[in-house]
C-alpha cells in the first residue's frame, strides 16, 4: 500500500518489533533471569506496554525525563542507567516520593555519600570490559563504596554493561563477552557479600551479550535495548539479519546527478542522524541501506553521503549491479546504522501493521 | 555566576551571537547584497527577530516546518532551500495562500513541471562545486528548466551553495570559493537571460564564502546560517576563533577512570550529536572542546569518545599538560563540532546574558 506520509518520516514495523521482543523474552526465560528492557532506544510508552505481555514491569532508562514519562504510564520499577550526578538526586527523590522505585547507578564514594544522604537506592557500576565507567570487581574501592550504601540501606546490587561486545562479530564472540559480563558482576557481588554487605541484584547486559549468553549462573537480571528494533550495526555483527530491522526512514527522491551516479533524497543527517556506526565494521553501510517503498533491500544501494536535509544515494564501492531507475518523487526506505540515534531525530513513530499501512502514530520522549 | 540548570543543557551566549550577526550584516552591506539568513541552524523565532535589526526580512529555511513557524512569527519572504519533492507542493501552496512569498528550489524538469502546474515560484539550483545537487551553468537542461518556469511565471532566479568551501582553510581559499559561487550563479543567470528568460534573483552563499567574498558583482543576495553561532568546524578553517562560538553544552562530571586519564560526563552523543566534523580537519576535536563552567577553554581537553548519555573527556593525543582536578559534580561546557547538529539535539536555548546568567529560554523548531 503506498504511504502518503510527508517525508522524511520514521516508520516502525510492528510485526518485526514484536518478533524481536518475543525472541529476547524467550531467551531470558530460558536463561532463568528477569529481563529489564532498556527503553533508551524506543522512548515510547506504546512500545513499553508491548513488553512482557503488557506487564509494565522492570525497565531501564537513560534519562530522568524517560523515568518520569514511563512512571506516569504505570512503570514503578525503574533503573536510571547513567552514573548519577549529585545535582539530579532531588529530582530522583521526588520521583520516589510518588511511589516509583527509582534506582540509580554510581561508581565512586562521592556519589555514594550523596545517595546515602538522600536515601536513594543505588547499584554499583562494574567495569567488565574497559568500555567506560565502573569499578573493577577487585578494586578495593568497591567494598568502600558498597559499605557507604549498605550502612544506609541504599545498596541494591551491582550492574555491568559490555559495551565492547558491539565491536566483535558472531555468536561465539558474544558468548565470550556475556561470560566476561557475568563473571565480573558475579565476582563483584561475591566481593561485597564476603565483606558482609547485601547484594541482592546482579544485573548484566547489552543486546549482543543478551543474545549470546549461554549461562547466567549468579545473575538475576538482564538488560538490553536495541533488540526491539535492531539496526545495521547489530546486523553487521550477526546479532540479527537485515530482515529483522523494524525501523526505517521513508524518504523521497528529489533529484539526480546522473554523471556521478547519484540520486538525491530528502533524508539527510537530520533524519538519519550523524551516526556512522558501520564505518568500523566489515561492510560500511554509509548513512544507511536503501530499500524500496515496501522495505525490500535494493542490492548494493546505500546513502553514501549526507548534508542536513539532503542524502546522496549511490551504489557501494565495488558493486557489480547498476543504478535502478528512481524518478523524482519515488519513495524509498532507509535502514539506519543505529536505531537509538536515528529514532532520536524524530518525535513519533509511524507504525506499520501487517498489510504495510500506517495503523498508528506513537509519540517518543525527548530531552532530559 | 554558577548555573543551576539540569545537565545536559544547551547554552547560547547572546553577546557573542549578536557580535557574529553584526559581523556578517556589515559584510553584506559592504558587498552591496541582500542578506537572506539561513535559519536551519538557529530554528528559533527569538533568533530570527534579532536579525537585520528586527526587520523580519528575507530568510532561508531547510524544512516546511521552519517555513510555517517563521511565517507565523511574521516572516513573509522565505526560500525553502532543499530541492522540492512534488508531494510537498500542496503544503507550499497552502502557505502561499496565507500571504507568504514562499519560494522553492529545483534542478530538473520533473520538478519544474510540477511547480509550474501548481503556480509555486522557484529558483533553479546551480551546481558550482560538485558538492551535491544542481545544474552546471552550461548544462542545456538549465534553459529547458528555466523555460518551463518562465512560461508559467514561476521563474525567480538561480541559487548556488559552495558546500565544498567547508573543506578548505583560510581567507584566500574562501575568497576563491566565493568567486566559484559568484561566477557559476552569474553565468547561469546570463545563460537564462540570453535565452530570453527572466532571472531577477542571483543568490549565493555559505558561511565560509560569505565571509571570504571580496566582490559579488552580479549577485543580488547572500545566504548563510551557521555564522550566527559558529562552531569548531568553522574555527578549524579560520572563519572564526574559538572565542566567537556562541553555543555550548553544559554538562556535569559523573565519574573518573583515573588509570586511563578519563573524566566521565553526562553529555554523550545524544547531547553533542554524532557529528565529528573536525575529524577531517587539521585538529580533530573529538566530540568537542572542554571549557570550564564560565566558558574558558581548558587547554588540550576534549570529549574523546561518546556513548548515548556518556561522554569521555581526556587530554588530546600529544598534549603536554596534565589533567586538571575535576571532581564529581563539576560543571563543564563543551564547544560543539557542528552547531546545526548539536542544537538539533535540544528543544530550547538557555540564553546567557552579559553577566553569564541565564536570562531567557528560547524554543527551537523541530521536525519537518
Image: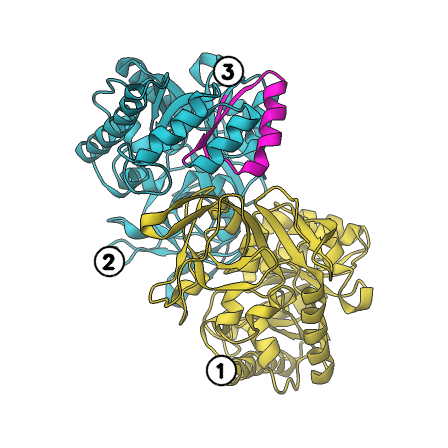
Chain colours: A cyan, B yellow
The reply to whether discs 2 and 1 touch (Cβ–Cβ < 8 Å) is: no
Q: Nearer the viewer, mark 2 or mark 1?
A: 1
Residue A129, picture quadrant: top left
Q: Position of residue B178 (x, y in %)?
A: 56, 80
- Residue at image mark 1: B173
Residue at point 34% right, 36% down? Answer: A135
Classify mark 1: residues with Cα within 10 Å, few (<14), some (14-19) or many (20+): some
Q: Chain of mark 3?
A: A
Q: Report the disc number at residue A318.
A: 2
Q: Chain of mark 2?
A: A
Q: Chain of mark 1?
A: B
Q: Report the disc number at residue A56.
A: 3
Classify mark 3: residues with Cα within 10 Å, few (<14), some (14-19) or many (20+): some
Q: Nearer the viewer, mark 2 or mark 3?
A: 3
Classify mark 2: residues with Cα within 10 Å, few (<14), some (14-19) or many (20+): few
Sequence-earlier tag: 2 or 3: 3
Which element type, helix, strand or loop, lies under badge 3?
Answer: loop
Q: Position of residue A159 (x, y in %)?
A: 36, 28
Find out whether residue A99 is within the magenta segment: yes
Q: Report the disc number at residue B30.
A: none
**What is the spatial separation of the Cα atoms under label 2 and label 1, in whole angstroms?**
34 Å
**What is the spatial separation of the Cα atoms under label 1 and label 3, in whole angstroms?**
59 Å
Residue A197, picture quadrant: top left
Q: Which residues are magenta?
A: A78-107
The one nearer the camera, B62 or A136, is A136
Residue at point 55% right, 27% down? Answer: A117
Q: Position of residue B4 (x, y in %)?
A: 66, 44
Q: Nearer the viewer, mark 1 or mark 3?
A: 3
Amino acid at each position: 500500500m503506498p504511504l502518503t506520509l510527508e517525508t522524511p518520516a520514521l516508520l516502525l514495523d510492528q510485526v518485526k518489533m514484536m518478533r524481536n521482543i518475543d525472541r529476547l523474552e524467550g531467551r531470558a526465560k530460558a536463561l532463568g533471569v528477569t529481563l529489564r528492557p532498556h527503553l533508551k532506544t524506543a522512548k515510547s510508552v506504546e512500545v513499553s506496554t508491548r513488553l512482557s505481555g503488557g506487564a509494565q514491569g522492570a525497565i531501564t532508562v537513560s534519562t530522568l525525563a524517560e523515568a518520569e514519562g514511563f512512571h506516569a504510564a504505570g512503570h514503578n520499577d525503574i533503573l536510571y542507567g547513567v552514573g548519577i550526578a549529585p545535582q539530579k538526586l532531588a529530582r530522583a527523590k521526588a520521583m520516589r516520593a510518588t511511589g516509583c522505585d527509582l534506582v540509580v547507578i554510581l561508581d565512586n564514594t562521592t556519589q555514594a555519600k550523596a545517595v546515602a544522604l538522600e536515601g536513594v537506592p543505588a547499584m554499583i557500576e562494574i567495569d567488565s570490559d574497559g568500555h567506560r565507567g565502573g569499578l573493577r570487581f577487585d578494586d578495593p574501592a568497591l567494598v568502600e563504596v558498597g559499605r557507604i550504601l549498605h550502612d544506609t540501606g541504599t545498596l541494591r546490587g551491582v550492574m555491568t554493561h559490555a559495551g565492547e561486545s558491539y565491536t566483535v562479530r558472531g555468536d561465539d564472540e558474544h558468548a565470550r563477552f556475556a561470560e566476561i559480563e557475568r563473571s565480573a558482576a558475579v565476582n563483584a557481588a561475591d566481593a561485597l557479600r564476603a565483606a558482609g554487605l547485601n547484594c541482592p541484584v546482579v544485573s548484566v547486559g547489552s543486546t549482543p551479550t543478551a543474545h549470546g549468553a549461554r549461562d547466567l549462573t549468579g545473575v538475576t537480571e538482564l538488560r538490553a535495548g536495541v533488540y526491539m528494533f535492531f539496526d545495521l550495526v547489530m546486523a553487521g555483527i550477526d546479532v540479527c539479519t537485515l530482515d529483522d530491522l523494524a525501523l526505517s526512514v521513508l524518504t523521497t527522491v528529489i533529484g539526480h546527478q546522473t554523471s556521478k551516479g547519484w540520486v538525491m533524497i530528502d533524508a539527510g543527517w537530520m533524519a538519519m542522524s550523524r551516526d556512522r556506526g558501520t564505518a568500523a565494521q566489515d561492510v560500511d553501510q554509509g548513512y544507511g541501506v536503501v530499500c524500496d517503498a515496501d522495505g525490500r533491500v535494493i542490492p548494493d544501494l546505500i546513502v553514501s553521503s549526507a548534508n542536513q536535509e539532503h542524502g546522496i544515494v549511490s551504489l557501494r564501492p565495488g558493486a557489480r549491479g547498476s543504478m535502478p531507475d528512481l524518478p523524482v518523487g519515488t519513495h524509498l526506505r532507509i535502514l539506519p546504522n543505529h536505531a537509538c540515534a536515528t529514532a532520536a531525530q524524530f518525535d513519533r513513530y509511524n507504525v506499520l501493521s501487517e498489510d504495510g499501512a500506517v495503523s498508528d502514530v506513537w509519540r517518543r520522549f525527548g530531552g532530559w
